[in-house]
């Protein structure tokens, strides 16, 4: 189905969401149509943020908002849906468009398997009526379903369109780029060289995939790395938990701007705990690149100043490899909580693979290695 037809049938003029590769057609359409005009389209920090924005839009206009997300984001919406939107509370109507990763019987990555199994059950538990859109869904069928949904929305309840893989298409071309010169893979290669045998916790998406392939190319073991294949935004908290319990070991976190934004409160907790052995590297390409390249707001804020305000001893930005290498060496030689923000280009190798070890195997090898450290 053409995404333009879905948008026409829904009939809303306000969308907010967190990008998803399964919804790339919708994301690209919204960027082409609205860009990031906050009157019509906001790329939010996390899915709960989206729900609250949607509620504010409805309160101000009386109209029905649309929230788009990957099904992994259902966990982030449970509280605001149950305690804000629900018809037993404020009765705020909302339309969800949800990319169905890990659909049963459809192969997907391990972090999506269980989430895929419970996607529809979570919607049922939240009393959200849903309709599944596949490649075979006809426009008139969707139109009839939307007519039914409008009655539900008038009651102050919520509905959802669950999007199967390949169900939506868009012929327009949207290019995502920035003016930064350093590639993420090369940045990670420099971190691997500097970190030696120190443990690394890497964020979800292409960063972990690139770290895995760098180790392979170097002939190194993977026991040094914990690849956070899911739970976007939580890698730095995992790293904090490790650092606080391995105080004689330097711990590195490879993070991304979208992940930092998703749960920025983690920086405040890290700064308050102030582990002297943690080096937090934020690779900032101002984009949700792993799921298509849509922009984040990280190009409009100062992550380093936020980190300093949260209690990090030192937070610096590197825009060249010479600056970055200097900061890596400095961080290794100082016993204090550090953040290094690295400005990064958008893009990756077309042939970039995925980890060939199972998530549980990664965890066990990493724990065994940590157990050998002080």
Image (cartoon, rainbow, N blue to C red):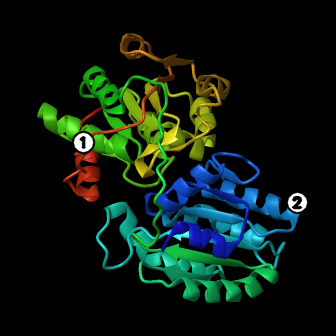
Q: Observer-nearest residue: 215 or 246?
A: 215
Give the answer, above or below, for where 337 lies relative to 153: above
Q: Is residue 234 left or right of residue 297?
A: left
Quadrant in which residue 334 is drawn? top left
Residue lying at 27% horizontally and 40% vertically, measured from the top left: 349
Residue 356: x and y in percent read 19, 53
| Furthest residue toward left | 219
Q: Determine if residue 124 is in view.
A: no
The local secondary structure at tag 2 comes to helix
Residue lying at 70% horizontally and 87% vertically, measured from the top left: 147
Query: Residue beneath label 1, please?
Result: 212
Quadrant in which residue 56 is drawn? bottom right
Residue 354: x and y in percent read 25, 51
Give the answer, above or below, for where 244 lies relative to 152: above
Give the answer, above or below, for where 372 lies relative to 138: above
Query: Residue beneath label 2, please?
Result: 60
């Amino acid at each position: 189905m053409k995404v333009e037809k879905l948008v026409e049938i829904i009939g809303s003029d306000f969308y907010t969401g967190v990008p998803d590769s399964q919804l790339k057609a919708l994301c690209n359409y919204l960027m082409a149509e609205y860009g990031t005009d906050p009157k019509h389209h906001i790329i939010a920090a996390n899915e709960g943020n989206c729900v609250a924005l949607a509620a504010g839009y409805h309160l101000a206009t009386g109209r029905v908002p649309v929230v788009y997300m990957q099904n992994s984001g259902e966990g982030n919406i449970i509280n605001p849906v149950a305690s804000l939107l629900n018809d037993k509370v404020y009765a705020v109507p909302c339309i969800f468009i949800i990319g169905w990763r890990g659909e049963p019987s459809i192969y997907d990555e391990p972090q999506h398997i269980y989430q895929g199994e419970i996607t529809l059950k979570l919607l049922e538990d939240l009393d959200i009526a849903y309709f599944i859109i596949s490649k075979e869904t006809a426009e008139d069928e969707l139109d009839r379903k939307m007519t039914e949904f409008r009655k539900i929305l008038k009651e102050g309840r919520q509905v959802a369109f669950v999007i199967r893989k390949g169900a939506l298409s868009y012929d327009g071309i949207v290019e995502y780029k920035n003016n930064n010169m350093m590639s993420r893979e090369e940045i990670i290669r420099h971190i691997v060289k500097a970190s030696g045998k120190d443990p690394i916790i890497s964020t979800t998406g292409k960063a972990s995939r690139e770290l895995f392939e760098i180790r392979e190319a170097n002939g190194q073991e993977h026991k040094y790395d914990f690849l956070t294949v899911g739970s976007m935004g939580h890698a730095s908290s995992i790293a904090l938990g490790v650092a606080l319990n391995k105080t004689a070991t330097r711990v590195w976190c490879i993070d991304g701007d979208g992940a930092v934004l998703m749960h920025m409160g983690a920086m405040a907790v890290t700064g308050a705990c102030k582990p002297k052995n943690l080096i937090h590297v934020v690779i900032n390409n101002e984009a949700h690149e792993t799921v298509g390249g849509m922009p984040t707001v990280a190009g409009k804020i100062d992550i380093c100043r936020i980190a300093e305000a949260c209690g990090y001893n030192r937070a610096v930005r590197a825009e060249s490899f010479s600056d970055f290498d200097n900061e890596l060496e400095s961080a290794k030689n100082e016993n204090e909580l550090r953040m290094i923000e690295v400005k990064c280009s958008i893009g990756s190798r077309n042939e970039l693979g995925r980890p060939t070890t199972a998530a549980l195997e990664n965890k066990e090898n990493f724990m065994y290695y940590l157990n050998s450290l002080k």
